[in-house]
Amino acid sequence: MSFLTLTNVSKFYGDTQAVSGFNLTVEKGEFISLLGPSGCGKTTTLQMIAGFEAVSGGRIELDGRDITHAKPNTRGLGIVFQTYALFPHMTVEQNVAFGLEMRKCGAAEKRDRVAQALSLVHLEKHGARYPRELSGGQRQRVALARALVIAPPVLLLDEPLSNLDAKLREEMQFELRDIQRKVGTTTIMVTHDQSEAMSISDRVVVMEAGHITQVGRPLNVYEHPANRFISTFVGKANLLEGQVVGAAGERADIAVGGMMLSLESTDTGLRGGGRVVLGLRPEKIRCTAPGQGRCNGEVVRRFFLGSQWMYEVETPLGLLSVLSANDGAEALEQGAAVGLAWSDYSLRLVSTARSDEGVAA
Amino acid sequence: MSAAGTTSVAPPVVSAAASDKAPGQRSLPWLMSAPAILLCTVMLLVPLVLTFVLSFNAYDAETGPKAGTFTLEHYAAVLTDPYYYGIFWRTLWISGLVTLICIVVGAPEAWILNRMRKPWRSIMLLVVLAPLMISVVVRAFGWSMLLGPEGLINGTLVALGFAKVKLLYTETAIVIALVHVMLPFMVIPVWTSLQKLDGGVANAALSLGASPVTVLRRIVLPQIMPGILSGSLIVFGLSASSFAIPGLLGGRRLKMMATIIYDEYLHELNWPLGAAIALLLLVANLVIMLGWNRMIERRYKKALG
């Protein structure tokens, strides 16, 4: 049975539609990410679940209870805000204890639960400090402890890691996931960072302009992006525009830039002559000796990324980005001739003429 | 005069790094603050010292103050006469009451102002600030027209069949007019501290199960307390030393400190006695305000930094 259900939820500001037709069911204990560029409606959706934004249409149900129009202070959800929103005039302990006080929790139980929550986020020693005496990462942990101490049915995270520096953000991603696993709280996180969404969530909900465009496991979204936007927003992709020459069963031949590429696709709608966009991930392309790959090209530019090299290779298919592991082999020089190879199933159909750029194909 | 108590001149800050520099550079901070120092010295310190000296000079009804003499008789006269105690007490309670009313009216006003939408907020802020743009004398006369025996309020009461109420030349009139004048000085500091408030904080408290009233009491109020307290310092100081409003709305018989000083100087021509009262007012104001300030700091410094 689904735990949190959003049915046809929408939000209008006057004539402007911020969110529309939002349908999602969340299972108990699941970690869901709402992923999308700024202005796509993901934060508005979270605010509606939290109760800070009125719902214009649709229903939100939590554990069988209709909370569509319930007041935010009666929903009992745990929320971590982007700015953390800690109470500046209270110590860490008082911050964490606040939710328990509102629940008229006994003194002894309160003390125990606050200590437990603080040890969960490794802040046992900082209970007597004020928020302004803590670092960004520590404030983040306090905010998390404060939201979790009330044992909420659902934890809502609004861009929780966006104010942290890159290294800390990575650490916190895994810690957040560990804590969520340990506590088992159903969690919904809003983020614009695809790698964050990929690395910690069970399912990713991709949003564009107020609509859901794809829902799926991170690997699935990455490997089978539903449209052109997602293929470039979630990871990098080389987009190849071509024309269907022939299609039979699960195979199709596509002409791109004077070359013939074969595609494995379950899309039966492909007809000869139709225009399509194919996606090819940079890390799926292998560099070979010239003449031994599927096509030849010349390295135009190269970037050193530490663990990888990124080459931009001029080919008959257009300019392709290629990621190659920094595995000790000598890197290609600028201007070097190179062969490029990939397997058939690395090539993905991103969109066809009939649903170009549109809602989920 | 006692408004001087609130104006402090900070010495120019010379950092450790600056002191290593050439002498010419070291004097730069002093040079730059010279105009302000000069202004404070000429306009504030010199008159204050002169008043201080004057208050110890002997007074003769025939010839006026005698320079170069020393006596404590003026202080003794003020401190032993119940008449002055009455005026002291009236000044104290009127200023305290005005401060209290300003808190009760001004803090919610600032809160509402802060929650208003774009065009209305600037308009209402202008309305709040408007009293500051009109001369205090004009405002005082405005109130005397409203509160007078034939004024709008009594006119309305009579029209409704009630008896007339004596408002003008009462303490009530002084309090009403002072609140009107002082309100901006409460609204602005509270508004400033409200703007520093993170909007998410109230939502965070709501999400943790707090009712809107609890959010106001436990989350918003403690954070705007510094604003309320600094506002009350300004309001109290200015009320206690206010002259025009008690002068025009209190009439001849209801004296406050500033008006009695004026009387001693210009009607009795007893300058030394006026100076002594002025200095006593300054000291009383300083003691009350510094004590208040210390209490605030002790209470909120740790929590709000």
Image (tube, rainbow, N blue to C red):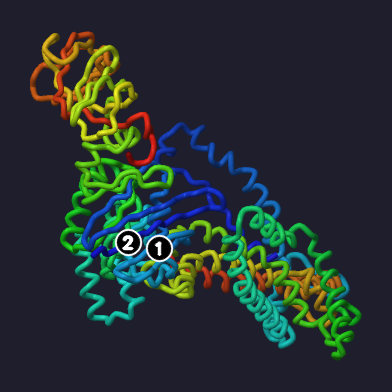
Q: Is residue A176 left or right of residue A75?
A: left
Q: Is residue A172 visible?
A: no
Same subunit: marks 2 and 1 = yes
- Of residues A182 and A21, which is closer to you in this image? A21
Name the residue type under label 2: Thr
Name the residue type under label 1: Arg
**Crowd class of label 2 (few under 14; some 14 to 19; many from 20; radius 10 Å):** many
Which residue has dot 2 on it?
A5
Residue A68 placement (x, y as % from top left): 41, 66
Q: Residue at left 76%, top 69%?
A: B243
Q: Residue at left 57%, top 70%?
A: B289
Q: Which callout, 2 or 1, points at the residue further toward the start of the chain?
A: 2
Q: Residue at left 20%, top 53%?
A: A177
Residue B140 placement (x, y as % from top left): 81, 69
Q: Is residue A296 visible?
A: yes
- Badge 1 marks a residue whose secondary structure is strand
Residue A59 is marked as: 1
- Of residues A87 and A260, which is closer to you in this image? A260
| Screen quadrant of the C terminus of chain A | top left
